Image: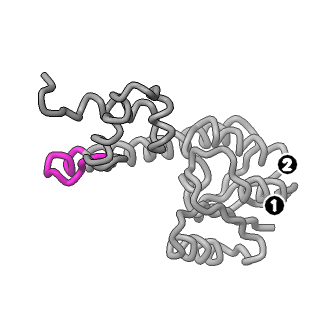
């Protein structure tokens, strides 16, 4: 039996594309397991757990790409070991892999290395994009928790001396670190 697995982002378009590709590979809709909004490095994937549990001797787990199944060598190796123990096979796109023997494990390691490299490239492109956006002034970081007027009020309350930084933080609904940052930023007339 063919058992499909798809890991998709939260966009419906991504789910439709992968499920359609699994159908084209011969997987019936009732045998498709999907995880939504999870990264490939997240080890807690209920859809994958259900798909692996359903795989038995002679069954084939079908994925559209290895990156949809795993993004690290240890994760891929664990999945392949579970499939091999169940007597199942793995199909990545049009390629079938029998999982018994050292050749299959070496091949899986190579495929997982490629998926791991792909994940590294995604991270690199993200960092490059953020650096470019920052250079253009489009990436400014997180917005301040408090407005300048709220910061002045917070510092005034703290300087009155009747409350601790922790109490002021609780009153304003911020962390103590935010209180200390506000104290550093706010300057009143006559402050040096």
Relative vertical location of residue 50 with respect to residue 119 in this rendering, above or below: below
Q: Are marks 1 and 2 in contact (CB under 8 Å)?
A: yes
Provide the secondary structure element on which disc 2 rests.
Answer: helix
- Residue 144 x, y percent position in the rendering: 32, 46
Q: CA distance from mark 1 to mark 2?
A: 9 Å
- Residue 32 x, y percent position in the rendering: 72, 69
**Quarter of the rendering occupied by the N terminus:** bottom right
Relative vertical location of residue 18 with respect to residue 61 in this rendering, above or below: below
Q: Residue at x 35, y 39 (%)?
A: 154
Could you tell whether 168 is left or right of 4 in the image?
left
Mark nearer the N terminus (1 vs 2): 1
Residue at the extreme top: 192
Badge 2 density bin: few <14, some 14–19, many ≥20, Cα 10 Å? some
**Quarter of the rendering occupied by the C terminus:** top left
Circle 1 residue: 59
Q: Residue at x 60, y 60 (%)?
A: 7
Could you tell whether 32 is left or right of 65 in the image?
right
Provide the secondary structure element on which disc 1 rests.
Answer: loop
In the rendered image, residue 132 lying in the magenta stretch gets the answer yes
- Residue 72 x, y percent position in the rendering: 56, 40
Res. 125 in view: no
> Image quarter for residue 3?
bottom right
Magenta stretch, residue numbers: 131-141
Q: Residue at x 71, y 44 (%)?
A: 80
Res. 137 in view: yes
Circle 2 residue: 86
> Image quarter for residue 131?
top left
In the rendered image, residue 88 lying in the magenta stretch gets the answer no
Q: How many marks?
A: 2
Badge 1 density bin: few <14, some 14–19, many ≥20, Cα 10 Å? some
- Closest to the observer: 54 or 178? 178
- Closest to the observer: 2 or 137? 137
């Amino acid at each position: 039996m063919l058992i499909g697995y798809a890991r998709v982002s939260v966009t419906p378009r991504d789910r439709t594309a992968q499920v359609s590709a699994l159908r084209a590979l011969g997987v019936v809709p009732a045998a498709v397991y999907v995880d939504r909004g999870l990264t490939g490095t997240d080890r807690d994937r209920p859809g994958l757990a259900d798909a692996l549990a359903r795989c038995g001797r002679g069954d084939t787990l079908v994925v559209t790409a290895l990156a949809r199944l795993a993004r690290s060598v240890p994760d891929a190796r664990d999945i392949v070991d579970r499939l091999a123990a169940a007597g199942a096979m793995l199909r990545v796109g049009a390629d079938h892999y029998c999982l018994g023997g050292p050749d299959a494990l070496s091949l899986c390691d190579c495929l997982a290395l490629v998926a791991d490299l792909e994940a590294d490239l995604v991270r690199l492109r993200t960092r490059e994009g953020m650096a470019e956006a920052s250079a253009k002034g489009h990436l400014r970081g997180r917005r301040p928790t408090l407005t300048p007027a709220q910061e002045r009020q917070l510092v005034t309350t703290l300087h009155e001396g009747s409350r601790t930084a922790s109490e002021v933080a609780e009153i304003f609904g911020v962390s103590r670190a935010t209180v200390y940052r506000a104290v550093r930023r706010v300057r009143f007339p006559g402050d040096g």
